[in-house]
Amino acid sequence: MIERYDYRGRREGGRRPLFGQRFIPIRYLVPNFATLLALCAGITAIRAAIEARYELAVALIVLAALLDGVDGRLARALNAQSRFGAELDSLADFVSFGVAPAVLIYMWGLGPLRGLGWIAVLVFACAASLRLARFNAAIDEDRPKWRSNFFNGVPAPAGAIAVMLPIYLEEAGIVIVRDWPLAIVIYVMVMAGLMVSTLPTYSGKLASERIAREYVAPALASVALAVGLLVTYPYLTLSTVTLAYLALIPFGVHRYELRRRAWEASQAQARQVATSSGADAGAAPDTTGSPPVPPTETRH
């Protein structure tokens, strides 16, 4: 594939520069407002964790994750995607889903371990930054559409929600997790490893593009139910969602392998058909009266 560049040096078909023109439509700024709100929520969560207001810190990180899921869809819906927005989103994600959960986990349950606990959350924050950097580096890569349904590794928002599972379990009254700080350290390190891994995890991007008309009302009712459960039983709901997400990772890997094999088989079949068609065309007689071209030659 030949890449073409416009007069600004921007690859054609890529993200447009936000400040590459004199006047910017207001709709371009709407997704960035959502990103900045998520960033403010993440920074405020850090303050709440330092002040030992752990419930507020958890709520703000969850809010940041919800806003992170909204800003990208707003950008696509408004045709307001830009390189500036992509970079701002990654910086906000690092603070909200790398630094904020790390500070919260350390202040909540790893403080008694001092150096060991700090190393664990430091590794988690670095893993979040590496995961986001890898995502940015691959953002303009050409790949088949079906791969948009999968992430490489656990995405930063999901990792931030999942790493707080010890808080959910204790606050829901299921188990006193802070009695086993070493178990928290191991769990935080495992989540850091999942974020920087290349395990395919289900994203659901293609599934959320369209919905059948008969499922619109049930979908809206499901959203209302989810919000009601999250507000009424926050820690029990978050515990269930996190455990279900982690349990679905092996199924996502299996589904990815099935799709990959089917795609590779279809590509091999297409190449075989193209080769056969080229060979047949090469064996056809020349209409100008010249002798036929041998099958080993290629005609243009």
Image (cartoon, helix red, strand yellow):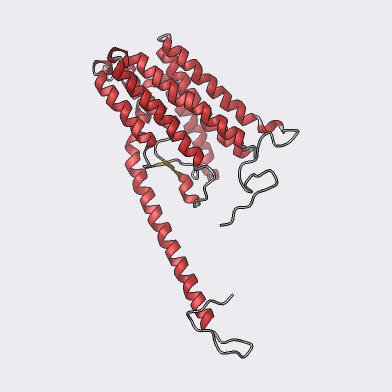
**How many numbered dots are placed on residues in this image?**
0
Q: For this view, does 94 lie left or right of residue 72?
A: left
The quadrant of the rendering that contains the C terminus is: bottom right
Q: Which residue is pictured at 45% across the width and 14% down the height?
A: 56
In the drawing, does residue 96 fall left or right of residue 6? left
Residue 172, position in %: x, y?
33, 18
Is residue 173 in view?
no
The image shows residue 99 at horizontal and vertical percentages of 44, 22
Image location of residue 217, percent across then percent down: 53, 37
Q: Is residue 181 left or right of residue 65?
A: left
The answer to whether residue 56 shows anywhere in this view is: yes
On the rendered image, what quadrant is the N terminus found in? Answer: bottom right
Tell whether 1 sits left or right of 252. right
- Residue farthest to the top? 51
> Which residue is at 39% across, 39% downward?
153
Q: Is residue 267 above or below residue 70?
A: below
Q: Is residue 47 above or below residue 37?
A: above
